[in-house]
């Protein structure tokens, strides 16, 4: 029989915060946009002169501010379930378009809010918004090419 020892809840929070801080700190080493993801999207419709790629990127750029607004409104109302869902959605959509830094920020936000609720998410939201701004600027270049 394995004997388990419970860690008091007040000791878990600093460890979880350290995990989040390490993940967020390491985002700076990620590319803003992963070229391999862009190429994978291009390969899905190789003969359309990037029309499919541009459509997917345009949807991402249009939808992301709405999901970020969902984060803010669910935080203001204290709705953790909607907050986690919005963070998860942002993680998936940013991954689909290769916005690596933004994906990491959304993943940290989702993980934090699932494990610790909505307390202390302000800094993580700000990092997500900054990562989105950088991704938006990089991805818009594909729309005008």
Image (cartoon, helix red, strand yellow):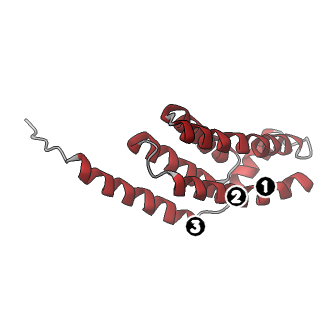
Residue shown at the point (83%, 55%) measured from the top left:
140
Percent position of residue 28, x then y: 58, 67
Considering only order in the chain, which callout, 1 or 3, is on the residue closer to the N terminus? 3
**Residue for badge 1:** 139
Q: Residues within 10 Å of mark 1 (few under 14, many from 20)?
A: many
Q: Residues within 10 Å of mark 3 (few under 14, many from 20)?
A: few
Percent position of residue 108, x then y: 49, 51
In the rendered structure, are the residues bearing label 2 and label 1 in contact, judged by CB atoms less than 8 Å apart? Answer: yes
Of 9 and 54, which appears nearest the observer? 9
Determine whether 115 is above or below 105 in the image.
above
Considering only order in the chain, which callout, 3 or 2, is on the residue closer to the N terminus? 3
Numbered tag placed on residue 32 in the rendering: none
Q: Quadrant of the N terminus?
A: top left
Please identify the quarter of the rendering in which residue 57 is found.
top right
Percent position of residue 96, x then y: 67, 43
**Residue for badge 3:** 28
Residue shown at the point (71%, 61%) measured from the top left:
134
In the rendered structure, are the residues bearing label 2 and label 3 in contact, judged by CB atoms less than 8 Å apart? Answer: no
Q: Quadrant of the C terminus?
A: bottom right
Residue shown at the point (61%, 39%) measured from the top left:
73
**Residue for badge 2:** 33
């Amino acid at each position: 029989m394995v004997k388990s020892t419970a860690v008091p809840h007040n000791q878990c929070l600093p460890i979880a915060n350290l995990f989040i801080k390490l993940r967020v700190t390491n985002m700076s080493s990620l590319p803003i946009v992963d070229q391999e993801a862009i190429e994978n999207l291009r390969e899905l419709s190789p003969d359309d002169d990037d029309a499919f790629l541009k459509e997917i990127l345009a949807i991402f750029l249009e939808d992301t501010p709405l999901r970020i607004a969902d984060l803010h409104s669910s935080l203001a109302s204290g709705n953790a379930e909607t907050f986690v869902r919005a963070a998860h959605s942002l993680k998936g959509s940013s991954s689909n378009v290769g916005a690596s830094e933004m994906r990491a920020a959304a993943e940290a936000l989702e993980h934090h809010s699932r494990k610790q609720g909505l307390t202390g998410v302000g800094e993580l939201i700000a990092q997500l918004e900054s990562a989105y701004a950088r991704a938006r600027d990089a991805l818009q270049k594909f729309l005008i090419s």
